[in-house]
Image (cartoon, rainbow, N blue to C red):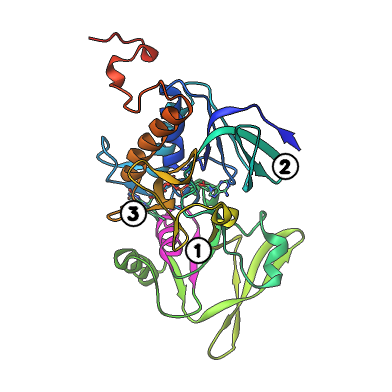
Amino acid sequence: MHSHDLVDITIIGGGPTGLFARFYAGMRRASSQIVDALPQLGGQLTALYPEKYIFDVAGFTKVLAKDLVRSLAEQSAQFGAREHLNQRVVGLEEGDGHLVLVTETDRFPTRSIVIAAGIGAFSPRRLPQACAAPWYGHGVHDVVTTPEEYRGKRVVIIGGGDSAFDWAHQLQGIAAHVTLMHRSDRFRAHGATVAAVEAAVAAGSADLFTFHELADVRSEGDRLSGVQVRNTKTKETREVACDVVLPMLGYVSDLGDLLNWGLTLEKDEILVNSQMEAGRPGIYAAGDVTTYPGKLKLIAAGFAEAATAVNQAVHWIYPERKVAPGHSSNMEIFGQKDD
Ligand SMILES: Cc1cc2nc3c(=O)[nH]c(=O)nc-3n(C[C@H](O)[C@H](O)[C@H](O)COP(=O)(O)OP(=O)(O)OC[C@H]3O[C@@H](n4cnc5c(N)ncnc54)[C@H](O)[C@@H]3O)c2cc1C
């Protein structure tokens, strides 16, 4: 097992809350690092809605989720703290006067922890059909990061929720053709997006198959060339030629071992007090993973909670340092003078 250097604050989760926590730790001259299970920073913004606009982040009239992540990552990296990606935290141990976070391959000794784990380590829900399994990564993709990759391609989207309809809508004009397939006629998507996709169907640029499921995958050589789909009511099958299948079946998320750390929990969320303390000395929590009366699961709330959690952690590690950070506009670390 690879053991990393001891730092002041280890942040579990590199979503917006964790990124802002890392910035704040640097501003308070505390060493820090982010540990995240996903291969990219950004949490839900990167994994679930990179191409969607966000309208309620202070300072932006509107901002694409992926652009907000880029800005947060840039701000967060300025003090040199690292991120360790593809590292899912699976355990917590007591070290010699410090804590140790354990992943499958690494150990992260740390003086304190800020848990910014959101809805937990999440992974896309996979198609249950065994025929799809060998095609994941080349022909079957459950995360869309760059829509341009689908330019000129015939795309089959499977699902009936927001992501399925969002992509069926957003790939209009990019993909050569879009077929959306869902196993019922009940959609869990925004009405306006459903209407937009139905309009595309009426205009002949998309197909919508309700009560259909994947029956088989067709290939030419090592290339996916189509799917056989089955009507769940009549059991009739039909062939759909396509280049790409995008299963949009939602995510499975799991807080896993965090639930066994003796923290104050309420329905699988961490019940924090106004100092963002999580029920065990040196452990704080912020963002979507937390709950308290009046909690808002929003990016803006996560930012404020991250600042509180880090300021408390810094004071806990170094009691001589005040909880209140002072104003960044006066800070020497930014080359400013106290006025
Ligand atoms: C479709 C959609 C649209 C949204 N639109 C808006 C909006 O317009 N405005 C708004 O304010 N909010 C919006 N939200 C909510 C917003 O995305 C969340 O409030 C925000 O992502 C919470 O940030 P977070 O950093 O606390 O958690 P997350 O973004 O969930 O990040 C948590 C990170 O922790 C990691 N993690 C979890 N467990 C572990 C572990 N054991 N080991 C290692 N890493 C772990 C995860 O991999 C993840 O990267 C939207 C959400 C969705 C799904």
For the residue marked with disc 3, what is the amino acid? Tyr
Q: Can you say whether 209 is above or below 271 in the image?
A: below
Q: Is residue 166 magenta?
A: yes
**Nearest to viewer (mark 3 / mark 2):** 3
**Residue that mark 3 sits on:** 292
Image coords of residue 171 (percent x, y)? 45, 56
The residues colored magenta run 161-181
Q: Earlier in the sequence, mark 3 or mark 2?
A: 2
Quarter of the image where the C terminus is located: top left
Of the numbered discs in the image, which one, if any, rests on residue 250? 1
Tag 2's secondary structure?
A: loop
Image coords of residue 185 (percent x, y)? 42, 80
**Nearest to viewer (mark 3 / mark 1):** 3
Q: Which residue corresponds to the image point at 43% horizontal and 34% vertical from the top-left?
A: 21
Q: Work out how far the residue at label 2 is from the one at label 1, CA to CA, in angstroms.
A: 28 Å
Q: Which residue corresponds to the image point at 52% horizontal and 52% vertical from the top-left?
A: 144
Q: Nearer the viewer, residue 278 or 43?
A: 278
Hey, which residue is sitting farthest left in the picture? 339
Q: Earlier in the sequence, mark 3 or mark 1?
A: 1
For the residue marked with disc 2, what is the amino acid? Thr
